[in-house]
Amino acid sequence: METTMAPHNAAQAYARVGLETGVIAANPHGLVLMLFDGALCAIADADAHLTEGRIADRGEAISRAISIITDGLAASLDLDQGGRIAGHLFDLYDYMSRRLLQASLTNDRAALLEVSQLLGELRTSWAAISGAARRTPSTAIPHHAAA
């Protein structure tokens, strides 16, 4: 029995392999950049779904962003070794998660934009530490999108 893969499924599988390869090859600094990029991409997806009226998809994208922020970025902080900076980042990640939850409950595009901008600034700063790409990912919500 021959099985064929739909073009959409094939593209998803290819992207998944690319992501897994990137994770395996990345150093810890690069992994944090990937978390920032993933959260920014999820928020951009949520904004697009909100614009198109796809409420279930919007909720899934926001949940994905919250998970990346709480289970990835916040969980990777070493509060003992990181001191006040780690504590402030933890509080900021908590704030972002609450804003995203609010965005989900009230279709608040301004909250999506706010969190996207905060994550973009943190990503830029994190990238500058190692001299990595200093660009804001194209998946960030453009400033005019919330207008």
Image (cartoon, rainbow, N blue to C red):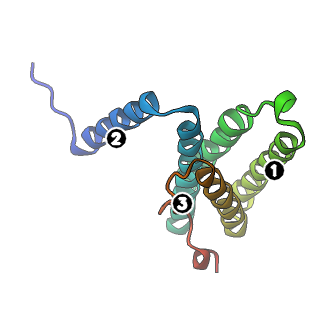
Point out residue 10 in the picture as x, y percentages from the top left corner: 25, 38
- Marker disc for residue 15: 2
Question: Which of the pair 139/81 is nearer the observer?
Answer: 81
Looking at marks 2 and 3 on the same chain, the residue that comes earlier in the sequence is marked by 2
Looking at marks 1 and 2 on the same chain, the residue that comes earlier in the sequence is marked by 2
Q: Is residue 11 left or right of residue 76?
A: left
Q: Is residue 47 left or right of residue 12?
A: right
Mark 3 burial class by Cα count in 10 Å: few <14, some 14-19, many 20+ = some
Separation of disc 1 and disc 2 at Cα?
A: 30 Å
Q: Nearer the viewer, mark 3 or mark 1?
A: 3
- Please state the total of marks drawn on the protein image: 3
- Where does label 1 land, which residue? 92
Q: Nearer the viewer, mark 2 or mark 3?
A: 3
Amino acid found under the numbered disc labelled 2: Ala
Amino acid found under the numbered disc labelled 1: Leu
Question: For the residue labelled by badge 1, is the local secondary structure a helix, a strand or a loop?
Answer: helix
Separation of disc 3 and disc 1 at Cα?
A: 21 Å
- Where does label 3 land, which residue? 134
Identify the image quadrant of residue 118.
bottom right
Question: Which of the pair 96/138 is nearer the observer?
Answer: 138
Mark 2 burial class by Cα count in 10 Å: few <14, some 14-19, many 20+ = few
Q: Residue furthest left?
A: 1
Amino acid found under the numbered disc labelled 3: Arg
